[in-house]
Amino acid sequence: MRFGIAVFPGTWSDRDCAHAVSVLGHESVPLWHRDRDLQGVDCVILPGGFAYGDYLRTGAVARFAPLMESVQEFAAAGGLVWGICNGFQILCEAHLLPGALTRNASLEFRCQMTWMRVERTDSPFTRECGTGQVLAIPVSHGEGRYVADPETLERLEGERRVLLRYVAADGSPVGGVSVNGSMRDIAGIVSAQGNVLGMMPHPERACEPLLGSDDGLRMFRSVVAAVEHDSLFADAAPRREPVR
Amino acid sequence: MRFVADVVVSLKPVVNDPQGLVVRAGLHQLGFAEVGDVRVGKHITLEVDAANQEQARQRVADMCERLLRNPVIEDYGIELRAASGASPEPLSGPA
C-alpha cells in the first residue's frame, strides 16, 4: 500500500515515518504542503514537527495549507488520516478532531518513553494490537496536554473514541499525572467515523528493537491490514477514490 | 482610515494555565505576597484599514474567530484606536 506523508515547512518526522513504512516493505510519498494532489495514497500521515514554526499556536497556520483542503475532503470521504504529535495539533486546529493540545502541565518539553493502553482494537489503527495491550512509544513535545470541555470528554468516552490512554509501564492507571497532564490521560483520539486518528506519541520512533521498542510498528501494520484486507470500517464511505 | 487594534487573547477561565501558576509562584517568591490568580495570554497589535471604527472592529473580530484565537480554549478582547497620523498609505516604501 501507499502512505502519503505531509511535509510542511518545519516538519521534522516525515523521514522517520517514511522509514517506518519502509521497514514494513511498503511505499510512501511525500505530500508537499502547497500541493493539493494526494497522489492516490491509502493513508495520509501528518507527521511531527513544528509546521510553519508553530507560530501563533501549534498547528494554527498549517491548517490553511492547500494540502489540508485535500486532506479535509479525503477525511470526509472516509480516508485514513493519521496525525502524529504536531499532526494531532493540526487536526484539532482544523476541527477534524475536537479539543486542543496545550502546554504540558510541567511546562517542560518532554522527550521520553511513554506507555499507553490500547482501548479498542476494532479500529483501523489498532487492529493488529491486543485488547488492553500496553504499547511502549516515546513522546517528544512541549504542548501535548489534551483538553476539552466536559461535554466533549463525555461524548468521546461514550462513543469509545479514546483510542490510546497513557498508563504506567505496568499498565496501571496514571490518574491524571501522565507525561503532559492530559485530561483523562488521553494520548490519542479518533473521529466519529473512526478514520481520523490524532495521537501525541511517535509510533515511527518505535519501529525497530534497536530504538528500544517496536510497538509502534503494530500501528503501521494495523493500517496496512485495514487497507489491504477487507477493512473493519468498510461502511465508512467509498474511500478508495483518490481526491484531486 | 487606518486603525490600530490591540487584541488580547487569553485562556478561558476554565482552562488550567500552568504558565500563570509558575509566574504566580515566582512573584510570591520575590515577596509579592499580595498576588492572587495570574493568567498568561497574548497581545497582538494589528494595523487595519477600514471605512470606520465599526467596520474595523467587525473585521478584527472575524480575524479572531478564524485565526487569532482557538475557540476551544481561548477568549479574546479588542481595543481599537485611530492610528497616529492616520495615513492610509504604508508608512514605509518606495518614495
Image (spheres, coloured by chain):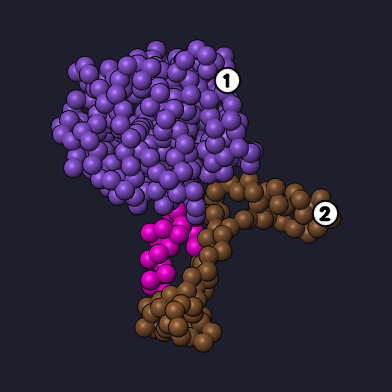
Question: Which of A20/A75 is in front?
Answer: A20
Name the amino acid type tagged 1: Ala
Q: Which residue is mark 1?
A: A168
Residue B30's disc number: 2
Residue A193's disc number: none
Name the amino acid type tagged 2: Leu
Question: Which of A124/A120 is in front?
Answer: A124
- In percent of the image, x 36 and y 83: which residue is there? B51
- In percent of the image, x 33 and y 35: which residue is there? A30
Check the rendered structure and report the hue given to chain B.
brown
Query: Up-down: is A23 above or below A153?
Result: above
Question: Which of A69/A103 is in front?
Answer: A69
Q: Is residue A138 left or right of residue A66?
A: right
Image: magenta residue range: B57-76
Does dot 1 land on a helix, a strand or a loop?
loop
Pointer 2 local density, CA inside 10 Å: few below 14, some 14–19, many at least 20? few
Check the rendered structure and report the hue given to chain A.
purple
Most distant residue in the right direction: B31
